[in-house]
Image: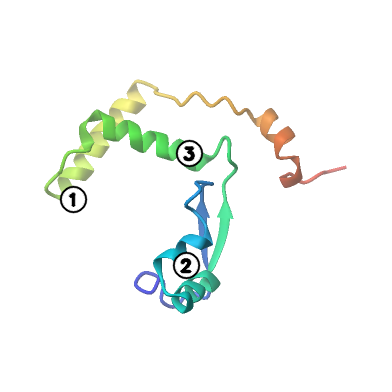
Amino acid sequence: MDEDFPLADKILLVMDNLNTHSIASLYETFAPEEAKRIKDKLEIHYTPKHGSRLNMAEIELKVINNHGLSARIPTIGQMREEVAAWNRRRNQEACKINRRFTTAATRIKLKRLYPQFK
């Protein structure tokens, strides 16, 4: 926070619902005064437990890791080339995530988050 966003009044942080993603983790890591300072600067939004877009990104990162990009790559330029090549292959193969939490199911389960229009 202090390095990347020193002038920000608030930082919007989007996190999934992993049990370690809580304010309590700040107090386990930092002195109480520092943890409170960090907490007061954060505005935390949690993604839904099921069907999170963040989970889909994590799935793709796991796939890329399993396809050989977990090895040390010596330069950022080479890393960009490797990721771009992997991404082209994934797109050519039309790889998809089988998302079972449909839009209709989302609207039922999370109806409190959706506006009601009349």
Q: Could you tell me the amino acid type at mark 2?
A: Tyr
Q: Could you tell me the amino acid type at mark 3?
A: Asn
Q: Could you tell me the amino acid type at mark 1?
A: Ile
Nearer the observer: mark 1 or 2; the answer is 2
Q: Residues within 10 Å of mark 1 (few under 14, many from 20)?
A: few
Q: Quadrant of the N terminus?
A: bottom left
Q: CA distance from mark 3 to mark 2?
A: 26 Å
Residue 41 appears in the figure: yes
- Picture coordinates of residue 48, whole percent (x, y): 60, 43
Q: Secondary structure at mark 3?
A: helix
Q: Quadrant of residue 49?
A: top right
Q: Secondary structure at mark 2?
A: helix
User: Circles 3 and 2: CB distance less than 8 Å?
Assistant: no
Q: CA distance from mark 1 to mark 3?
A: 25 Å
> For mark 1, what is the residue?
76
> For mark 2, what is the residue?
27
Task: Check residue 104 in the rendering and tell me which mark sits there, or answer none.
Answer: none
Q: Quadrant of residue 108?
A: top right
Task: Name the one closer to the observer, 77 or 112.
Answer: 112
> For mark 3, what is the residue?
55
User: Circles 1 and 2: CB distance less than 8 Å?
Assistant: no
- Specify which label sits upstream in the sequence, 1 or 2: 2
Q: Does residue 6 sit above or below 96 in this rendering?
A: below
Q: Does residue 69 sit above or below 32 in this rendering?
A: above
2 with respect to 23 (left or right): left
- Specify which label sits upstream in the sequence, 3 or 2: 2
**Residue at (55% x, 73% y) in the render:** 40
Q: Quadrant of the C terminus?
A: top right
Residue 87 appears in the figure: no
- Specify which label sits upstream in the sequence, 1 or 3: 3
